[in-house]
Amino acid sequence: MKNKAIITSALPYANGEIHLGHVASTYLPADVTTRFLKLNGVEAYYVCASDDFGTPILIQSEKEGKTPSEYVAYWNKRDYDDFTSFGIDFDFFYKTSSSENIAFVQDVFNKLNAAGHVYEKEIIQFYCNNDKKFLPDRYVKGTCPYCKAIDQYSDLCESCGRVPEEISDPKCSICGQIPTKERTTHFFFKLKNFGDSLYKWLDENENLQKDVKKYVQNWIKSGLIDWDITRDISWGVHVPLEKYKDKVFYGWFDNHLAYISTAIKFLNDKGINGKDFWNSADIYHFIGKDIVYHHYLFLPAMRLGINSEYKLPDYIPTRGHLTLQSKKISKSRNWYIGLKQFLEYYPADYLRYYLVAINPYSQDDLNFDWNEFTNRINSELIGNLGNFVNRALGFTKKAFDGVIPETEKYDDKDMEAENKIKTLSTELGILMEQNHLDRALKKIMEFSSFFNQYFQHKEPWKKESGTTNCVFLSVNAARSMAIALFPFIPESSQKIWDQIGLDGRVNQNTWSSISDIGVKSGHVLGKVSPLFVKVEDEDIAKYKKQLGPVE
């Protein structure tokens, strides 16, 4: 692990609200990891941007009587506000329509073109005579030629994850009519030429998930296709050639370049040489499994095409999709929960805890289930963690007026408890570095469970020998948990910190200090109160009824 890092996550499309499915696989794992890296002494920056271009935005802005710029500005702010309410702590949140990104995308194109990695080609493209427009990307639906899945977009099969050369049984997704084919000239990126170098990069990068690498390498073996990088619409980054100035770049050509342009802008504005920092840092791109093709092939190939002027990613943590009550999330069918809506029900930390706990470092899909959410919050977050912190601090308040007592000679149980504290930071750190965030959170809960049992075993309320040791070590365990929990449930971790009566912000500590015995005898606790409020079944029943067809 380097002492510098840049963290990105797949850019939110500026065309609708953020829902639970968005945050589960990308933004929350990226935020948890960034918080961990910063605690661990890494100069880490989490940057993101709204993805502002494309046909859907053009059409929707027309419907609402807004310019595309006005439309995306609204969603850029709304998305940022929703993320912030959820505790996603971006160091910088920008936009793909920024002047910096537009200039950077055009510069990359010019370099690729000069190096011979781009060519012009007359193509036959779908055209809707009813809507009087070319139909790029998500405005053509049909059958995937590879896996035969129906109702797939022309630029990505959500079933097998591949990008079709041409979709079968096409239909206009605006009006449903069968489109005709018309001639137009597009620019293509020679992705085929990068097969060997991509395969080598995948082979040598030990940080990438083995199962993802394997099937991407199989795609390379089966033959890559050159990539159409322009579109016949008005809203996008325009091709910087006079003859083709009416054409714009395909969204997947420009949006991941915003990872770089956004980071460089942020760093340069801080007085840091952005390019030097990028090339000396660990680069993380957090994504969902539906965009593996773009991030494991297009993105590195484009960087290779400009002679790795900006280094390729070190980590591409890839996770599965979130389903809701075991059904695919669908905004059109009202089968989704908006992030803003959820945060009106419960604190952000409830959702952060649950989504990390159920989300393994794999491409397996995960499921949001209201009943499981209720059980986990009530039994784990409240019954285990909240219960331990409250009983340890509450008993100290009651029996010792909130003053941490002097210790006696430790018995075996005390020594075991102290050892649990002294080994926690290392045990957790290994899992966090490996991106097993769910396992790290589970280990913290096991730590809490151990101290619940330790407290029960020592029976300090009997005021017998060993009582002071129990109180001393239990309060120190609560302190350790406050720091360890910061990446996962930051608001609650600060509450624990404040109740212990410790100064400042919990994130001003180092990761290794988790294993310090940091609360000394004579220290005075702060005000103690329950950390969490129980999730009630009647509320859950009400929220379940809100899902489904709109009457």
Image (cartoon, rainbow, N blue to C red):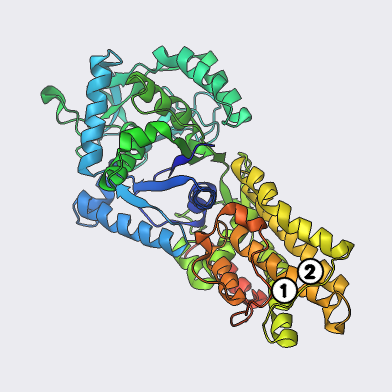
State if disc 1 and disc 2 touch (CB < 8 Å).
Answer: yes
Q: Distance between the residues labelled 2 and 1?
A: 8 Å
Of residue 52 and residue 498, the one placed in the foreground of this image is 498
Q: Earlier in the sequence, mark 2 or mark 1?
A: 1
Q: Which is more toward the observer, 545 or 3?
A: 3
On the image, numbered disc 1 is attached to which residue? 387
Q: In this view, does 248 lie above or below 355?
A: above
The residue sitting at 27% across, 42% down in the picture is 268
The three-letter code of the residue at mark 2 reads Asn
Q: As rendered, which of 275 and 148 lies closer to the eye?
A: 275
Residue 507 percent across, percent down from the top left: 51, 60
Vertical arrangement, residue 324 with respect to residue 157, above or below: below
Disc 1 residue type (three-letter): Asn
Tell me if 276 is positioned left or right of 289 in this view: left
- How packed mark 2 is, by other alpha carbons closer than 10 Å (few <14, some 14-19, many 20 or more), is some
Residue marked by disc 2: 452
Residue depicted at 27% across the width and 52% down the height: 72
